[in-house]
Image (cartoon, rainbow, N blue to C red):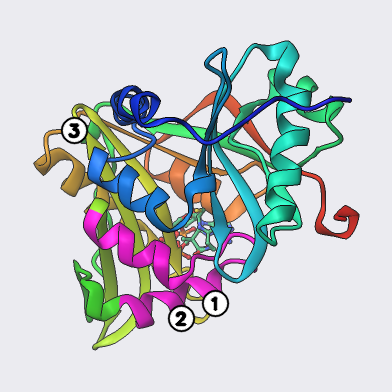
Amino acid sequence: MSGLAFREPTGGELAKLERMLVAARVFGSGAEMRSAIGGEPWRIRTTDIGEVAVLSRWRDHLPVLAIDALWCVTGAIPAAVQTLRELGWSVGLSDVVSPPVPVEETGPYEAAGMRAQTVVATFALTPLGAMHTARHVPGLKIRRARKGDVPVVLRIDAACFDLFWRYDRRHLERFCDTGRLALAEVDGMAVGYTLCTVDADDGLLGRLCVVPGMRRRHIGSALLAEAVSFVGRAGGSRITLTTQVDNQPSQALYRSASFSDTGRRYAFLRFGAERGR
Ligand SMILES: CC(C)(COP(=O)(O)OP(=O)(O)OC[C@H]1O[C@@H](n2cnc3c(N)ncnc32)[C@H](O)[C@@H]1OP(=O)(O)O)[C@@H](O)C(=O)NCCC(=O)NCCS
């Protein structure tokens, strides 16, 4: 399979891409985009006919290239993925993870040799007022987390998620600027957190977790209620989230809080690091 002729965009192309990528919410602002490619120019690739790929390091602790966004005709996806895989190798990243792909549309990625590693379900709550009131949890306080809290949030995250999904410091520090992290503490001890963003009407719950030793005490429900209330205060009228299709505890929690399954399923595909170069 021959690849696509991806290359670094010219200055003029970059100016146009900046508008497009900010409008598509791939970057929060032009400044963010320029800072991203400042040290890592490979992060935006284009071709002479306008195909575009936006890339990043998936996590600092893993040699995985993330395809954050890919614009090309469906038939060109296998060739694009092959070229991007080689680009990843050239910067020391031995595996690739796809963007979230609707499960009905994974064929072109599979044709490139990738396999679904995780499938997520999308849940939503509309209107926000439909959520049940969370029970009172003695000693629980939920407050906004700041950059100084990142080491604590990192520890909670590592206790709750496997190596592939857990965040690194870089991501969490960025979320302090681009989203809202809320930390749950019981009698002063940090036990869980949420990450939320609000874009016009739409709230997105990107993370919700409670450390293993403190589960089934309604702390997750309280964090969820607080996140929903934050989205409402920030002007959102609905909230969506994704969770792994086999994550029974989280789905039970979301259903108990009146979220409904939208039926939409997305796959994250990988080659598998062991099949790297
Ligand atoms: C999902 C998670 C946040 C739940 O937190 P929690 O504090 O244990 O949840 P709560 O105590 O508020 O549970 C509220 C309700 O959800 C349901 N629920 C929660 N965990 C459940 C489980 N393991 N099995 C069945 N139902 C469960 C129950 O209905 C529960 O009410 P009940 O205890 O009165 O029966 C926690 O298990 C977790 O952090 N998991 C790992 C990270 C994760 O998967 N996050 C979500 C996806 S991003």
Rendered image: mark on residue 19: none
Q: Do the residues labelled 2 and 1 touch (CB within 8 Å)?
A: yes
Picture layout, residue 215 above or below residue 32 = below
Q: Quadrant of the N terminus?
A: top right
**Quick one: label 3, few (<14), some, or many (20+) residues within 10 Å?**
many
Q: Do the residues labelled 3 and 2 touch (CB within 8 Å)?
A: no
Find the distance from the CA under tag 2 to the CA under tag 1. 6 Å
Q: Name the residue under label 2.
A: 155
Q: Name the residue under label 1.
A: 159
- Tally the marks: 3
Q: Residue at x 64, y 11 (%)?
A: 73
Please state the extent of the stretch shown in magenta in the rendering: 150-177
Q: Are marks 3 and 1 in contact (CB under 8 Å)?
A: no
Q: Is mark 3 on a helix, strand or loop?
A: loop
Q: Residue at x 20, y 34 (%)?
A: 129
Q: Which of 103 and 83 is in front in this view?
A: 83
**Quick one: label 2, few (<14), some, or many (20+) residues within 10 Å?**
some
Picture layout, residue 208 above or below residue 19 = below
Magenta stretch, main secondary structure, is helix
